[in-house]
Image (cartoon, rainbow, N blue to C red):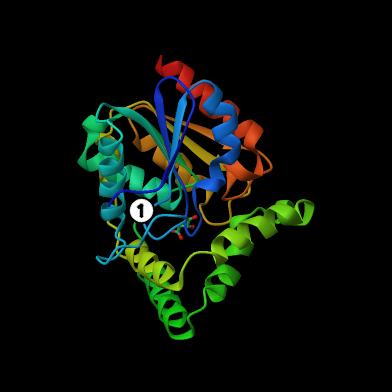
Amino acid sequence: MLLHCTDDGPGPVVVLLHGFPLDHTMWDAQRGRIGSVYRVLCPDLRGHGQSPLGDDGASVDAMADDVLETLDHLGLSGPVVLGGLSMGGYVALSIAARHPERLRGLMLINTRSAADTPETARVREGLAQIVESSGQVDPVVGTMLPKLLAPGTAAARPDLAQATSAVMKATAPASVAACLRGLATRPDRTADLSGITLPTLVIAGEHDQLIPRSESEQMARALPHGELVVIPDAGHLAPLENPEATNAAILKYLGSLG
Ligand code: MLT
């Protein structure tokens, strides 16, 4: 499926994949700063933002195939730098594992390689059923939003919490339910990490309530060329909560790729 995709800037291509249930707007601060030096593409993954859901579910591998199809459509079949936050990171890992020839760099941002635990998968299925029966995404937003931002961020920047909530609430109930199931059934990519030979930037949020720091550290260690950067004053949405530090880490990494 072809995805809606923003396309800014000159130079080598950097593709950024958003988290669940967000859209390309979560990268606005990166599009501005990084897009002044690199060509930054930010797709809306299926069922999010301005991209359709389609009729064959929303598995992480299907989302990954959509990204590659969209890049092909844009004439970008050569290797790109790919970054993904949380769900976007699961999609990026799917591409790194299945189509490594499409990448020349990888950024795993506030994300993990592990699959859902059975308990997490069960909670997601319960939420999917509530969203479907109520036709409302509010139960998901209410469950997730307090965990996305660092506690300090929500208090200091209610505008950011409000804007994030608005994007989440704009995601269609059918998309949210399909993605919850896609997330719950994604494969564990931990065993693939040792085979990823690309220089890989792992970004963690100092106060991420969803991904423990130890998990990001383990992931960086398991990658042959992994480097971990911890973003201060940020939770699970580091690029939104601390764009200056996140952009600095990304630009340093991109510069190191030559
Ligand atoms: C995200 O930010 O994309 C979600 O937290 C991913 C997830 O729930 O596993």
Side of 90 where 135 appears, left or right:
right
Give how far across and how far down residue 122 sits, in percent: 38, 75
Give how far across and how far down residue 142 sits, in percent: 60, 71
Does the image show residue 228? yes
Residue reaching furthest bottom? 133
Side of 239 where 122 appears, left or right:
left
Give how far across and how far down residue 82 sits, in percent: 38, 35
Q: Nearer the viewer, residue 153 or 66?
A: 66
Q: Is residue 130 above or below residue 210?
A: below
Element type where label 1 sits in the image: loop
Side of 221 where 26 appears, left or right:
right
Looking at the image, which residue is at 27% across and 30% down? Answer: 75
Cβ(mark 1) to ligand 1 < 8 Å?
no
Q: Is residue 182 above or below residue 206?
A: below
Side of 150 where 137 appears, left or right:
left
Residue highlighted by disc 1: 114
Looking at the image, which residue is at 44% across and 58% down? Answer: 48
